[in-house]
Amino acid sequence: MDSIVVAVDGTSGSGKSSTCRGVAQRLELRYLDTGAMFRAITWWMLSHGVDVHDQAAVAGRVGEPVIESGTDPLGPTILVDGLDASVSIRGDDVNAAVSPVSAVPEVRTRLLELQRAIIGDGGIVVEGRDIGSVVAPDAPVKVYLTADPEARAVRRAAEAGGDVAATQESLLARDRIDSGRTTAPLVMAEGAVHIDTTPYTLDQVISQVVALVEGAEARA
């Protein structure tokens, strides 16, 4: 398992984070949440008064923040300029701004370099929206998670609070932005296994992904 790379993409609220952490724990692999990295950049931009809807302004400062991602699935961390930002990056202000920041090509280029450096020689489960298609296209295991929009909204509202209907609209809006952006859009990568998590428990989804990884290892 030391060299395995498990690339997990999918829509917001489909269970990517919980699934990836669970798979990493079971197989004793590292874990990387690339979405947290985009949120960290977004939080930094907001904290420094950068207009997140001005792509040139975002691109001009994307090289400034120092982003450090921990890879322990039992306690993933995200540091921005040495500060723990794990709570701050989940705020409503970041939720509203992360899509436009993520669409800036220079942001994706900067984080792509960091992500590939962390992935290194493997032994890691990586979650995001362009892992199998862009970040690690040669990953031996690629998974694409989705779920029914209402189920996704219920899960996300339970995690973060809020109205289910409003949460569902927010998730669908995020899907439209992520799927429609020019740079690294949300797509199911070639060779990825699609899992609709709606009818399954978290443990069942984790088991399905673990089986895919073990199958890939056996073939190798």
Image (cartoon, helix red, strand yellow):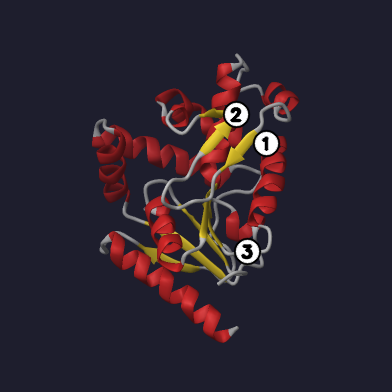
Q: What distance separates the C-alpha of mark 1 from that of mark 2?
A: 19 Å
Q: Is residue 103 visible?
A: no
Q: What distance separates the C-alpha of mark 3 from that of mark 2?
A: 25 Å
Choose the circle earlier in sequence order: 1 or 2: 2
Looking at the rendered image, the disc whose residue lies closer to the viewer, 3 or 1, is 3
Q: In the structure shown, which secondary structural element does the residue marked by tag 1 occupy?
A: helix
Q: In the structure shown, which secondary structural element does the residue marked by tag 3 occupy?
A: loop
Label 3 Cα crowd, 10 Å radius (few <14 / some 14-19 / many 20+): some
- Decide: is 119 above or below 70: below
- Residue linked to disc 1: 107
Q: Answer yes or no: do the residues labelled 3 and 1 have beta carbons within 8 Å? A: no
Q: What distance separates the C-alpha of mark 3 from that of mark 1?
A: 23 Å
- Residue linked to disc 3: 122
- Decide: is 89 above or below 117: above
- Residue 199, picture quadrant: bottom left
**x and y percentages locating residue 218 in the rendered image:** 53, 85
Mark sitting on residue 128: none
Q: How many marks?
A: 3
Q: Nearer the viewer, residue 76 or 186?
A: 76
Q: Answer yes or no: do the residues labelled 3 and 2 have beta carbons within 8 Å? A: no
**Point 40% across, 66% down: residue:** 26
Label 1 Cα crowd, 10 Å radius (few <14 / some 14-19 / many 20+): many
- Decide: is 108 above or below 214: above
Residue at the far top in the pictured view: 49
Mark sitting on residue 82: 2
Task: From the viewer's perspective, tell me whether residue 184 is left or right of residue 13.
Answer: right
**x and y percentages locating residue 64 in the rendered image:** 71, 26
Q: In the structure shown, which secondary structural element does the residue marked by tag 2 occupy?
A: loop
